[in-house]
Amino acid sequence: MLTETRGTERWKYTNLKSFLEGSWELAESLEAEDLPSRTRFSQYEGEKAGEIVLLNGRFIPGWSQTSIDGVTIRQKPLTKPQASQAANTLAAQDKIASTFVSEILEVEIAAKTVLKKPIVITNYVIGGESLSVLTVASTQIEIKVEKLAEVAFVEYFNGEGRTLTVPVTSMQVAPGARVSHLRVNATRSEAAQLGMTRITQARDSFMETYQLSLSGRLTREDLEIRLMEPGAEALLDGLYIVDGKRHSDHATTVEHIAPQTLSSQLYKGILADDSRAVFNGRVRIHRDAQQSNAAQLNNNLLLSKRAEADAKPELEIDADDVKASHGATIGQLDPEHIFYLRARAIPEAQAKAMLARGFAQDVAFRIRNEFLREGAIRAVDKALQSLNLGQDSGGSHA
């Protein structure tokens, strides 16, 4: 099913076969009387306006809080993916989603609705007893934000066992609407996630989206944003923290289709032990997208000589009146900074932890929505607590 991925440029650094070997099974559909206690799973730690809970790819009304003014949530009949989707760079996720998706949820935000606190979409997957079997669940969520609405969303992922989660989220942002979006992957160490987010923005809309890959054996996140009309603005940031033999891969695509559009992205990674991380960011400014502005930066911090980071920022510019920049860095903690803190009676491990936290939380502090920012800070701090900040801090520069 996934043998074609290594043959495409966007997948050259991620070999799915080695992570997803063995037999696959569809996650079990549980009736209300068979549901486990929700307390066995972690939950998003932050304030919320409401919550949509999915278990093994299916909506669980009893665990959800969906009575939100200005918000309509409904199930949508399943349809086959369009041929154009199956042919694009996100084909691997599309193919799995079309095979394993159980239902589609449609979320509509009415015009001029204002929700500062986020709607939390919680996604749990329970694996089987055998680690030789991969339990698969796919969810498809279609979000439509109407004119002049202001809303925030959090997608939170957790579960247990050897699982593969394939969340596919599409979002249409109408003229003048403002959306804040946070995706937090806090799955267990045996889990894999192949996520996909597609966003289309209309005139004078604003979108901030943040992807935090904090756990799991394998994480691949594809993000595609299309700025369709003048005045559309997108901020897309991400943070990945990997240790052990974990693998994280982020691929972003920003299409500046209309003039006077703006995009800015900052992705940061912290790598320890034998982990590996990949960032592939592509920005395309189309011929008619004059007076557009695009900035892209990827920074990686290596805490081990054995960790590996691959960075591939790309710019494709067909217009002549634009501002565009991109860059990438790979390095280690500055010994002078560590010495400065140790000279002030701060133990080495604590000094490294302080510097790593400052590096990582830079992404969280950029979130404009205060409720999402607070939740992101908590999630990042929790992930940093289990990170290996030992003596092996060497690395290479690029």
Image (spheres, grey):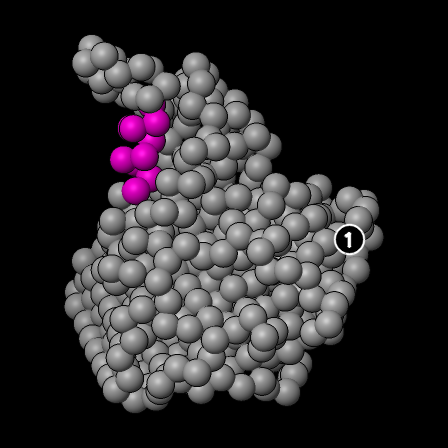
Start-end of magenta stretch: 352-361
Viewed as shown, does residue 114 lie left or right of 383?
A: left
Question: Which residue corresponds to the image point at 81% horizontal and 46% vertical from the top-left?
Answer: 130
Viewed as shown, does residue 190 lie left or right of 111?
A: right
Q: Is residue 378 visible?
A: yes
Viewed as shown, does residue 220 lie left or right of 120?
A: right
Q: Quadrant of the N terminus?
A: bottom right
Label count reads 1
Badge 1 marks a residue whose secondary structure is loop
Decide which of 188, 362 is in the foreground and name it.
188
| Image quadrant where residue 318 sits | bottom left
As for residue 130 lying within the magenta part, the answer is: no
Question: Which residue corresponds to the image point at 47% horizontal and 79% vertical from the top-left?
Answer: 66
Q: Position of residue 17 (x, y in %)?
A: 71, 46
Mark 1 highlights which residue? 128
Q: Where is residue 392 in the image (x, y as percent from the top left)?
A: 45, 16
Q: Where is residue 27 in the image (x, y as percent from the top left)?
A: 73, 63
Decide which of 119, 356 is in the foreground and name it.
119
Q: Is residue 63 above or below residue 108?
A: above
| Image quadrant where residue 346 sits | top left
Q: Is the magenta stretch mostly helix, strand or loop?
A: helix
Question: Which residue corresponds to the image point at 61% horizontal and 41% vertical from the top-left?
Answer: 189
Query: Badge 1: how crowded within 10 Å, few (<14), some, or many (20+)?
Result: some
Q: Is residue 148 above or below residue 274?
A: below
As for residue 354 lying within the magenta part, the answer is: yes
Question: Which residue corresponds to the image point at 55% horizontal and 79% vertical from the top-left?
Answer: 105
Q: Quadrant of the C terminus?
A: top left
Please state which amino acid type lies under the numbered disc 1. Gly
Viewed as shown, does residue 338 lie left or right of 70?
A: left
Decide which of 226, 124 is in the foreground and name it.
124
Q: Is residue 334 above or below residue 25?
A: above
Q: Can residue 96 be seen in this view?
A: no
